[in-house]
Image (spheres, helix red, strand yellow):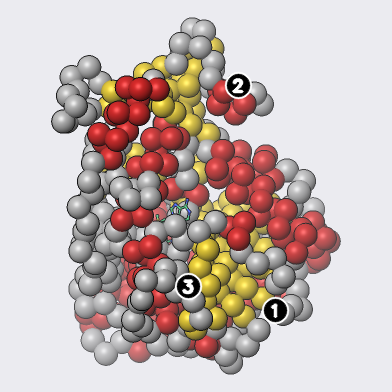
Amino acid sequence: MPQAIFECRWASNDAGDQNKQSLPRKNQGDLSRELAAKIRMMGPIPVAEYMKEALTHPTLGYYTTRADVFGKAGDFVTSPEISQMFGEMVGIWCVNEWRKVGSPKPVQIVELGPGTGALAEDLLKVWSLLEKGGDGLTLQLVEISHPLIKKQAQRLCGDIEFGDEIPPKGLKAIHGDVPVHWHSVVEDVPTDAFSIFIAHEFLDALPIHKFQFTEDGWREVLVDVSKESSHQNPKFRYVIARNPTPASKIFLKNGVVGRQPGVIREVSPAALALGFHLAKRIEEDGGFVLIADYGHLGEKGDTLRAFSNHKLHDPLVDPGKADLTADVDFRRLQDEVGEKAISIGPVPQQVFLRNMGIDVRMEVLKKKCSSEKEAKWIEAGYRMLTDPAQMGERFKFFALFPNVLRQFLYKFPVAGFPPPRI
Ligand SMILES: C[S@@+](CC[C@H](N)C(=O)[O-])C[C@H]1O[C@@H](n2cnc3c(N)ncnc32)[C@H](O)[C@@H]1O
């Protein structure tokens, strides 16, 4: 596995303090009133529709209107924001797996939902160091949020002036002089290169349908306007559909565990469709996929939650102003991919990062620190990423590889994951 030595990204305060320079929050307008009007006219809506509007409504959605959601000043912190070591381990993994299959070129790193660009930045740093530049590499970013596209461009490509053109065109990343392109959907990413897809905390932001087992069988949980609501100040509540809905007929047909009254299950058709698409892409055009997210193996049901200002928040209050997220069902994802590609994992984050050498990397970084405070900060980041009580267990890594590599991977197992059982 390649070893890398590079400089440390340092934040002055603590592990989650890297986004102090946030853009101003925009006035959110009123998504509540818009959703309430729709529900009054059309009837209760699926949770998936509510979630999609809350996160990605073009002018009132949570992600589409703001760039200041990450870090201490925002609503939540993610692993790439906590420590550079996270992106470095992912970068080493990418270079290692790509070299194992003969370093095919042209090659593109496709990151889905790149946030502030922290992961892409650390990954490119590693790539350009190990490959002595970024020759033959492009970075393709799939991002729906214009404020975040601006932030990513500034972080990755330097202090650039924006005209009206978003996404910007013709930019190159500082690290490795790598061309950077933006797309609003993964289907628009070019198919003429070997693709390394990375999705960190992306699938959990994709809309879920929610179902509850009742005396009449599975029924979809919908979002309705609550009775105490006024036009000026709408409030929402969950209701259970009286009859089967299209979603309950389509997405529960394969049998779902936990058929006791009151049990709740979630299905994200968007996440499953993405898994299917990525499996097909790597089979047809060459490449592999690394997904990292919090998730489970089908045993959890009611995971939809909201975060605001680092605190749990009622998902039905103030849509568009808080992050909405649901755990990824990796079992269902594996089932969806089926035989179309090789599924590897999921394994807990601490297993992946340790297998990739984060312990050694932490010691190297600590030795380079110029102060005790800096060394403590490196250690705090390491603990947060790997401690089972923090992010070490709940977050999982999952990979997809094309079937053509099946025999090869028995001989040369995928780094970061336990070797396959033969
Ligand atoms: C939870 S954040 C994760 C950011 C980053 N990967 C990280 O871990 O720090 C989700 C990211 O996905 C983007 N996003 C959410 N839904 C999207 C969609 N439907 N299409 C494209 N991007 C989306 C958001 O704007 C944001 O960049």
Residue 351: mark: none
Residue drawn at 45 percent across, 16 percent down? 241
Are the residues at dot 1 and dot 3 in contact (C-beta closer than 8 Å)?
no
**Badge 1: residue crowd in 10 Å (few <14, some 14–19, many ≥20):** few
- Circle 1 is placed at which residue position? 106
**Marks 2/1: CA distance?**
43 Å
Residue 249: mark: 2
Mark closer to the chain start, 2 or 3: 3
The mark lying in front, picked from 2 and 3, is: 2
Mark closer to the chain start, 1 or 3: 1
**Marks 2/3: CA distance?**
39 Å
**Marks 1/3: CA distance?**
18 Å
Residue nearest the viewer, comparing 142 with 253: 142
Q: Is residue 4 visible?
A: no
Q: Is residue 22 above or below residue 371?
A: above
Which quadrant contains ligand 1? bottom left
The mark lying in front, picked from 1 and 3, is: 1
Q: Position of residue 72 (x, y in %)?
A: 23, 62
**Badge 2: residue crowd in 10 Å (few <14, some 14–19, many ≥20):** few
Q: Is residue 196 visible?
A: yes
Mark closer to the chain start, 2 or 1: 1
- Circle 3 is placed at which residue position? 120
Residue drawn at 72 percent across, 70 percent down? 192
What residue type is disc 2 on?
A: Lys
Q: Does mark 3's beta carbon lie closer than 8 Å to ligand 1?
A: no
